[in-house]
Amino acid sequence: MSKITAAITAVGGYVPDYVLSNQVLETLVDTNDEWITTRTGIKERRLLKEQGKGTSYLAIKAAQDLFKRGNINPAEIDLVIMATATPDMPVATTGVYVATQIGAVNAFAYDLSAACSSFLYGMSTAAAYIESGRYKKVLLIGADKMSSIIDYTDRATCIIFGDGGGAVLFEPNNEGLGLQDEFLRSDGIGREYLKIDAGGSILPASKQTVENSQHFVFQDGKTVFKYAVSGMADVSDKILQRNNLTKNDVDWLIAHQANKRIIDATASRMELDEEKVLVNIHKYGNTTSATLPLLLSDFEHKFKKGDNLIFAAFGGGFTWGSIYLKWAYNKQ
Ligand code: UT7
């Protein structure tokens, strides 16, 4: 019997309507369009402004887009994995609420959290369920409402992040398409450089933590940048070598959209031509768990059955890794 592989069979995406441009940021903090563009590649990002709406809203919209584009019946889904760093609430599992709202009435659901690598790790998890033969349709959603944890007076972070959601469906494939190999890493050294100090079990929320702005993302950008450049380039290079792939064998690089310079460094290590490197950071900024599925959603029309896609991500923790996946369908 041939091995079951786990293929992506449908994609969806969603970003909120509100656009936060570099020009507007210039009025909030001491920054300018030229600095942001040359240092990050970002021109604008989307923010979910409506009161009372959280990450689940982005996730539901992305899943609904997938159902429409892929003509999928939600009742057939076995499992919903919600990759996010910004759950609706600390305890009530966001993925469970999302599954119910989208009509995945026969599925179980849970959240998976690994900062900006949440979706990449989720791909590994979703694929393993399919490869095991236990489940046939696994919906992986990556969504984050980063605006809920960003301090819009801190120019080190507010210029980078945006809100968004994306979703993919994994199903068994008997032609050998889908996930081929993965190389996932983590290192707790990263905890000091990218974090939210308060609101967890070490430092629960208090009047003082709020007054000290300790519920916002802190990032030592320079240090994270250094680790991200070497981390993402190393694992991407490694996955090519391990699978005897040359730069000509790679059709598309799907890299976490944290900084255009990090994406360029990864592509350069792989010696990839520019047209193979998919980029939408200029439109959305860093949407954390949503960057990879939003790339798939935006560029689905370009992929051909059998194309070799290399995914790469780097995030807080630190967490990082690379996945090699063969695309499984042509979009009509
Ligand atoms: O997705 C999770 C992983 N996260 C990442 O991968 C992010 C990694 N880090 C980065 O992308 C970059 O480090 C940043 C975009 C956050 C910052 O870029 P940088 O090139 O590392 O800038 P820097 O922090 O070294 O600052 C360079 C200069 C400094 O001025 P001086 O000391 O040279 O006079 C900063 O004060 O730029 C200044 N600066 C700014 N100027 C205008 C820092 N932030 C800003 C700003 N606008 N927003």
Image: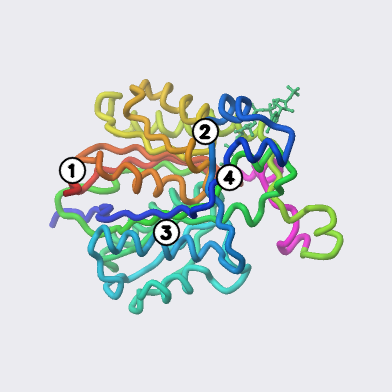
Dot placed on the residue nearer the N-terminal end, 2 or 1: 2
Q: Are marks 3 and 2 in contact (CB under 8 Å)?
A: no
Q: Is mark 1 within 8 Å of ligand 1?
A: no
x, y percentage for residue 285?
A: 53, 41
Q: CA distance from mark 3 to mark 2?
A: 24 Å
Question: The residue tagged with tag 2: helix, strand or loop?
Answer: helix
Q: CA distance from mark 2 to mark 1?
A: 29 Å
Dot placed on the residue nearer the N-terminal end, 3 or 1: 3
Dot placed on the residue nearer the N-terminal end, 2 or 4: 4
Q: Which mark is residue 231?
A: 2
Q: Look at mark 3 in the image and give the residue it sits on.
A: 141
Q: Look at mark 1 in the image and give the residue it sits on.
A: 305
x, y percentage for residue 332?
A: 16, 49
Q: Look at mark 4 in the image and give the residue it sits on.
A: 20
Q: CA distance from mark 3 to mark 4?
A: 24 Å
Q: Callout 4, which amino acid?
A: Leu
Can residue 287 be seen at all in this image of the molecule? yes
Question: The residue tagged with tag 3: helix, strand or loop?
Answer: strand
